[in-house]
Image (cartoon, rainbow, N blue to C red):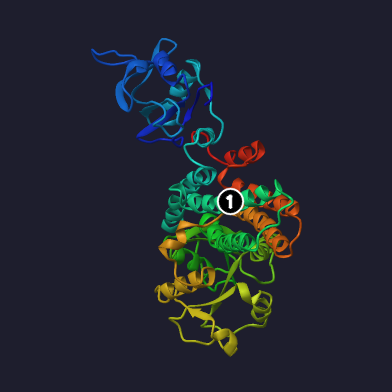
Amino acid sequence: MFDDTIAAIATPLGEGGLAVVRISGPAACAVGDRCFRPAGKATVALSLVATHTVHFGRIVHAGQVVDEVLVTVLRAPRTFTREDTVEISCHGGSLPARRVLEAVLTAGARPARPGEFTERAFLNGRIDLTQAEAVADVIHSRTELALAAAQEQLAGGLSRRVNRLRDELMHTLAHVEAHLDFPEEDLAPDTRDGLLARLERGLAFMDELLATAKEGRILRQGVRAAIVGPPNVGKSSLLNLLLGRDRAIVSPIPGTTRDTIEETANIRGLPILFVDTAGLREAADELEEEGIRRSREAVARAELVLQVLDVSQPLASREERFLAGVVDGRRMLVLNKSDLPRQLQLPASLAAQAVAVSCLTGDGLEVLKDAIKERVWAGEIRAEMLEVMINARHQDALSRARAAAGRTLAALREGRSLDLVAVDLRMALNAVGEIVGKTATEDLLDTIFSHFCIGK
């Protein structure tokens, strides 16, 4: 438990119906008493009221009423941080919330750091480190699937599996260290076989978790998809169609798009960041040349490239060069203006992978969405897949754990010294412990929680 009390605005700044100022720490109620004046005949101090109750009154600062508020009192340990907590609901808007926070800070609280409420929840044993990260994932979710995956992690789905793995490694290490205490006794064959079997199960489970890293990254960060092609083939129209709204300017004048435009769309539950680019052609001026340079840069950074062609026009030589310049593994051919008579002829190998659409009528849009989803995430997205999807930090820790556990397995099979076996096994155990925060360092915690918003 901490000996100081923190406070912050827990809702986004801006105009709205409500804003919430959160106070957490041993003096939360005392801080509230110094700036809150209950309304009505019963003027009981917040320090004396029952837990999980709401009270109407006013926040006062420097002798002036700041706002009429509702104050919720939550006593430890039944709170998010497992500390006494006071939440002040005031009128929305940046000014009322800031003035209420100013009154709270003057009353004895200190400003919370980014993510400090969630950090306290972790350090006080309310949640583990994977659940703490899931709090941020819930906040930043951009699709229903991403939200479902984050909620599964917040509920402890990943934590339970990682803790089972850690327990298996601990039991194995306990057996090894017990034999180290009696060096004159050899490891019995049946005992060695049992340890080998347990390590093999652990390695298989680590491989299973590591296989979810790509899907976890897609749900959390999305996929960059560049929309490229010559001028006037309908790149901006395709972006608008995929977004379901007019985001990019559409014009029959070539070169309308001079800069890249980025917007995220929900494609079959997956967040796809589409990048509309300037038409690829010989630049007519310096401004257009810069736009084309940025287009090529967007293609280089993209994980998926939607190459748009106009089916009502023959394939020009420069378009053939552009087609050859994109790696096939990332490319999808989109044949726009399918409502017009077809003049475009493609090699059979390219035509087989092309998707025909009409940005004018919307025909082919659903087929294109299915194709994008299959290219990004092959196969069905099942509910059980969302239960365990690791992030980049988990992947790094698991990779180190797997390497150390693999060395342990090899050493046991080859009958090497148990001292060497124990060293690698401890390394694997510590790496797995990092995932849930059992062996987390202060620097690691600072890095994780610094990415949170203030007030969470």
Tell me: residue 217, above or below residue 178.
below
Q: Nearer the viewer, residue 166 or 88?
A: 166
- Horizontal side of 278 relative to 16 (left or right) equals right
Badge 1: how crowded within 10 Å, few (<14), some, or many (20+)?
A: few
Q: Quadrant of residue 328?
A: bottom right
- Horizontal side of 178 relative to 134 (left or right) equals right
Asked whether residue 198 is in view, the answer is yes
Q: Quadrant of residue 55?
A: top left
Q: Nearer the viewer, residue 68 or 178?
A: 178
Tell me: residue 361, above or below residue 73.
below
Q: Nearer the viewer, residue 53 or 402?
A: 402
Question: Can you give x and y, in whole percent of width and height, for residue 251 in the image?
Answer: 51, 66
Q: Residue furthest left?
A: 41
Q: Nearer the viewer, residue 83 or 243?
A: 83
Question: Can you give x and y, in whole percent of width and height, for residue 103 in the image?
Answer: 46, 18
Q: Residue type at mark 1?
A: His
Question: Can you give x and y, in whole percent of width and height, for residue 38 in the image?
Answer: 31, 16
Q: Residue furthest front?
A: 184
Which residue lies under the disc numbered 1?
A: 171
* Callout 1 secondary element: helix
